[in-house]
Image (cartoon, rainbow, N blue to C red):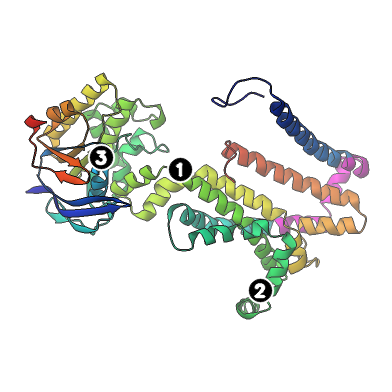
Amino acid sequence: MSYQEGSGPRSRSPLHYVCGGMLALFVLMILALIAADFIYLGQSAAGPKALWDLLTQQQMFFALRMSLATSLTTLILVLLTGVPIGYALSRYRFPLRAVCDMLVDVTLVLPPVVTGITLLAFFNFGFGQIIRAALERAELSTVSGVGIVMCQYLVAVPYCIRSAKAAFNGVDRNLEQVSRVMGCTEWQTFHRVSAPLALNGLIAGGVMAWARALGVFAPIMVFVGTGPRVLTMPTTLWLELSTGNIASAVAIAMVMLVLAGAALVLVHWLAPEGNIV
Amino acid sequence: MIGLELSGVTIRAGDFVVDAATLSVPAGQYFILMGHTGAGKTLLMKAVCGLQEIVSGRIAIAGRDVTAMDPCRRAIGYVPQDGGLFPHLNVFGNIGFALDLQGLGRREIIERVEEMAEGLGVSSLLGRRVGRLSGGERQKVALARALTRRPRLLLLDEPISALDEATRENISGLLKRVHEQYALTTIHICHNPAEAQQLGDRVGVMSGGRLMADELRSAEI
């Protein structure tokens, strides 16, 4: 480990060893946890074929399909709303902006189970009841993929907004002004200059939001439940665990780990500075 | 015909005020705007571009009142100090940026970009990423980009102040040639009296937010 340029002498101070040691311990802990999953699965599932058989069971396949379908729908909604919100927080000055900025983080700090209870409460009073009635008229229920998407959206959207705001903050305002003088309308400046220059951050935020959506558990448990038609990978994992089927639970965990790992690699490849979220 | 007319333009930016700036630049004139850092030159130019709101006054470009007009419709060619090139586009994309906005066909864009690039000596750079250009090359490309859209007014915000001596002379010569060729009304912000003498038809000075356009002639700098 070496100091960054300008940060001081290259001596090995006690601080150097303490911080470096903590980092090494943390990395070892994460690697040990991941390795434990693989070892456990290897012992209990008796090989790749058994693992494949576990994952291709109808219930597992349904959960995987439901998780992918809902999380990708959530991703689209998150990008459609999160990117403009991030742009507004980055570029515009308006009354109560600081309050809006803070509210974006509410679901980041809320215990996940509270998000689920909040959704339950919302759809049982006033405006929420009107929305629920409208959904029911359209033959849609909150106890379905719709409800799952609502839970995932609330958990995932702050990640997209935060990364979009950071990405737009990193775009040189002078370039946007030059484009306006060169003939761009505000909209053209957004899609020809701001968005392309912020693209890596926007994609990284989207990937991070998708990974979070894929892993949402507690709000779905509370708001949607664990009926056979609304099982996602996290809720299936919990059901398998609660019935003592640990090999299946670990198999699902491995799939989620691989998906989340791939998402992280993508995020770090797109935003190597690590300051996007 | 008047190329640029400012009538009592007042701008407020925090505590700083550009106070009732009045200026009349005949069409085709090369006007040099000098002044110390913080005198209000860039603020005034941003107001001309439509990027800075004005408190009162009137701005007209080529006889057209643009005071309330969106920046994109003012027909201005703008070259900022660092060139302001778009890093996600190559040199061709930068020079053709405004043409693409105008909805011209691909063939016409290519013709006009190649013609402009040849005129300014940047033909060999068309496929290059802007991050790989030298300071002088950046300014040439920025100038080509500003001229390609055939503006009514050319604004140069200290385009050569950050360049080395040899490159500065090279770009100064290019600016002179471009002005002779296109006869564009040009407003050039600079700090260097020698540069002002060499390029300007007329010189104005800003100090503490006040514009004294006709109080100095180039010979008196």
- At horizontal 87% and vertical 42% (from top left) the residue drawn is A49
In the image, is residue B73 above or below residue B145?
below
Q: Of the residues shown, which amino acid type is indicated by label 3?
A: Ala
Residue A50: percent from left, percent from top: 88, 45
Badge 3 crowding class, 10 Å Cα cut-off, few under 14, some 14 to 19, many 20 or more, is: many
Residue A187: percent from left, percent from top: 38, 55
Give residue A122's mark: 2
Residue B104: percent from left, percent from top: 28, 47
Along the horizontal axis of the image, is A106 left or right of B50? right
Nearer the observer: mark 2 or 1; the answer is 2
Q: Which residues are magenta?
A: A40-67
In the image, is residue B159 above or below residue A181?
above
State yes or no: discs 1 and 3 in contact (Cβ < 8 Å). Answer: no
State yes or no: discs 2 and 1 in contact (Cβ < 8 Å). Answer: no
Residue A43 within the magenta-colored segment of the rendering: yes
The disc numbered 3 marks a residue on which chain?
Answer: B
Q: Of the residues shown, which amino acid type is indicated by label 2?
A: Phe
Camera sees residue B152? no
Residue B121 within the magenta-colored segment of the rendering: no
The disc numbered 2 marks a residue on which chain?
Answer: A
Main secondary structure found in the magenta portion: helix
Give residue B146's mark: 3
Spatial CA distance of label 1 from label 3 is 21 Å
Give residue A197's mark: 1
User: Of helix, strand and loop, which one carries label 1?
Assistant: helix
Nearer the observer: mark 2 or 3; the answer is 2
Q: Same chain for the residues at labels 2 and 1, yes or no?
A: yes
The disc numbered 1 marks a residue on which chain?
Answer: A
- At horizontal 71% and vertical 45% (from top left) the residue drawn is A259
In the image, is residue A248 above or below residue A2?
below
- At horizontal 65% and vertical 39% (from top left) the residue drawn is A265
